[in-house]
Image (spheres, grey):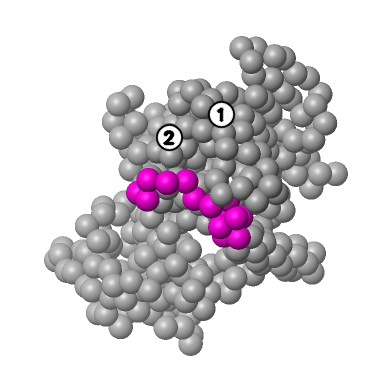
Amino acid sequence: MSIVISVIIGLLCLTFLVAFHEAGHFIAAKLCGVKVESFSIGMGPILLHKNYRNTDYRISLFPIGGYCGMKGEQDFQKAVELNLKEINAEPDSFYGIHPLKRAFIAFAGPFANFIFAVISFTIIAIIGYTYYSASAKVLMADSVYEGMTSVAHNAGMQDGDIITAINGEAVLDFSDIVTIVSTHPDEIITVDVERDGEKLSFSMKTALNKETGGGVIGVVSNPDTIEERQSKRYSFFPAILHGVKETTKMCRATVVGIITLFKGVKVSSAVSGPARITTMLGDTVKASFKASLHAGIVNTLEFMALISVSLFMMNLLPIPVLDGGLILAAIVEFVLRRKLSPLLLYRIQIIGIAFIACLFLIAIYGDIHYFTSSFRR
């Protein structure tokens, strides 16, 4: 019963994120003069609907996303079926507007997810949060665990060094070290430390954790220094700036994560599919709100921001059937100053569908591996 509740909560949160994404398309379509015929929260059979200003607003049965139905979206398919040389479309339809407007509509969906992440991190920065972490005074992993390798130790660091900054980014505690290092896998970084009052700097190449895809340097925390800590709280406008910075950092981390998939990372561990994401999100929301309202808000917003950034980045990939593919096709059409052949677009789309299907299968395999491993434990 517990896992069912987690799945339901996770699905509702994901549906909200997809609806936010579709709302971006909706607003942009209205601004560009494209008729929006329907806007639904959820998929499948319609439970409730209301027609307002020529748009049918719907709440559908299954909480697995949503859609923004624009006039003329099916014109592409009709052109392919009739073997037309170009897509014939009306002025207020998706394929009837200027290609740059079409690119704008396609970009607006992912951008809405970016905005949601900024809003989430802004709220977190304003309300702050309490967490537990060890200090930035570290121990070398090979000094604590036999047989382990420590990149930091090999670079000259020693037990008791206090890390003050990594790549110029200030470090306050051990959680900062983990966060910064993990987002720089297989990269050369500069670590500033304080040792007996002396400031030192070390250059080292992070190792790649093939289970998680994150970077490691072989340092461990001192458990005796773990204590309750309080995050920095910001006023409104600095909080917005902080939200933008955190979202941008997460975008970079997502790009790095995609790149590391081609460096021998164990895909079944590093890539999460829809089932695992839904369950993890539901578990996070449920456990956090059980602890306290404040913790629930912070952890839920942080997790949803992470997923929202992933939606932003993944949808911008120049792959047909994704928003990035629509943007690329619209830009090519603008540069060539002529409409692209529907048959050519269709063939490219088939390749895109095959690529997405492969990623989906990999993600599903990862989910199966994750859940079977959990049951064994």
Q: Is residue 71 visible?
A: yes
Give the residue drawn at x 81%, y 44%. 4
Crowdedness near tag 1: few (<14), some (14–19) or many (≥20) residues, C-alpha within 10 Å? some
Crowdedness near tag 2: few (<14), some (14–19) or many (≥20) residues, C-alpha within 10 Å? some
What is the quadrant of residue 362 in the picture? bottom right
What is the quadrant of residue 115 in the picture? top left
Residue 70 in the image, given as x and y percentages of width and height? 61, 30
Residue 244 in the image, given as x and y percentages of width and height? 35, 39
Q: Nearer the viewer, residue 134 or 127?
A: 127
Give the residue drawn at x 64%, y 45%. 79
The amino acid at mark 1 is Glu
Give the residue drawn at x 80%, y 26%. 46
In the image, residue 358 lies in the stretch drawn in magenta: no
Give the residue drawn at x 48%, y 80%. 145
Side of 323 where 64 appears, left or right: right
The amino acid at mark 2 is His
User: Label for residue 98?
Assistant: 2
Sequence-wise first label, 1 or 2 = 1
Is the C terminus in the top left, top right, bottom left or bottom right quadrant? bottom right
Report helix, strand or loop for mark 2: loop
Give the residue at mark 1: 90
User: Label for residue 362?
Assistant: none
Residue at mark 1 to residue at mark 2: CA–CA distance: 12 Å
- Does residue 291 lie above or below 213 as drawn? above
In the image, residue 345 lies in the stretch drawn in magenta: yes
Residue 289 in the image, given as x and y percentages of width and height? 64, 34
Is the N terminus in the top left, top right, bottom left or bottom right quadrant? top right
Q: Is residue 327 visible?
A: no
Residue 261 in the image, given as x and y percentages of width and height? 51, 70
Q: Nearer the viewer, residue 258 or 320?
A: 320
Which residues make up the magenta segment?
335-348
Magenta residues, dominant SS class: helix
